[in-house]
Amino acid sequence: MKKLSARRRHPLAALVVLLLALACTGGLYAVFAPADKAKADETAQSLAIDEGKKLFAVGCASCHGTGGQGSSDGPSLVGVGAAAVDFQVGTGRMPAQQPGAQIPRKKVIYTQAEIDQLAAYIASLGAGPNIPTEAQYGPEGADIAKGGELFRDNCTQCHNFTGKGGALTHGKYAPSLEGVAPKHIYEAMQTGPQNMPSFPDTTLSEQNKKDIIAYLNAVNGDDTVSPGGLELGGLGPVSEGLFAWIFGLGALIAVAVWVAARTAKAKKS
């Protein structure tokens, strides 16, 4: 009887064994879960690239080549990065309806999920700027005054000092920035689409880009009011020049006619 009692397990032994088993299971999960997650992310990325390649073959390859290497009808997309795709396709500029001096903004024909797939495929062809996150272009921590200074130094020559756009040479133009999504403004500065120069982080830092976007939102936002009434300064150089010629020259002609009439009347009397 004493021998059997000595072999009898402690009442808490089963609980200890269970806790050890759970601890081991958790440890094994901690070891293998990151690898499983990384593998799942890699699989999802591969699927996105495959789907993007299919979309590219249907909507883009006729101009940019079957491998994105470019052709006589479209430039190479190797190394342009995901940000360029998100901007061009996300604003409806691509696919282009027809070649021309300027590809205009139009209705977007792809969903955001399809745009992301196209971007993933193009990014796989060569390293380039990534699609920015909301933290990069959001208003948090932005300096509006600094953004206005940067915009006037780097962008006013083409886009007007409030981003209303303006005419360029040979049928080209700087589009209006009013109503453009902050993400797309950031991507345009990153990639330099069409006639626009690119502003990488070595030229305009991430904070600089955030400041410029905040300034544009301040002068063109839905809550922005113009206490002065007619925004002549935001119409662009062509409209302002036309205004000056019509009203300025017209006023001079009216004054000249009035002076001549008064002079003739004085001579008669």
Image (cartoon, rainbow, N blue to C red):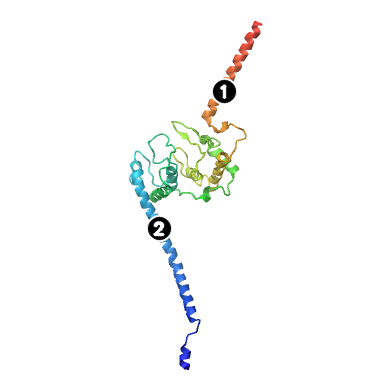
Amino acid tagged 2: Glu
Q: Is residue 60 visible?
A: no
User: Under tag 1, what secondary structure?
Assistant: helix
Asked if residue 223 is positioned above or below residue 168 in the image, the reply reads below
Amino acid tagged 1: Phe
User: Under tag 2, what secondary structure?
Assistant: helix
| Residue in the image at 61% along x and 11% along y | 261
Q: Which mark is residue 247?
A: 1
Residue 139 appears left or right of 74? right
Q: Is the Cβ of the residue at disc 1 closer than 8 Å to that at disc 2? A: no
How far apart are the two marked residues, 1 and 2, measured between alpha carbons? 65 Å
Q: Is residue 182 visible?
A: yes
Residue 197 appears left or right of 232? left
Furthest residue in direction bottom, as rendered: 1
Tell me the quarter of the image containing the C terminus. Answer: top right
Q: How many marks?
A: 2
Dot 1 alpha-carbon crowd within 10 angstroms: few under 14, some 14 to 19, many 20 or more: few
Asked if residue 168 is positioned above or below residue 254 in the image, the reply reads below
Q: Position of residue 77 (x, y in %)?
A: 39, 45
Asked where in the image residue 218 lies, by quadrant, the reply is top right
| Residue in the image at 45% along x and 71% along y | 25
Q: Position of residue 239 (x, y in %)?
A: 53, 28
| Residue behind mark 2 | 42
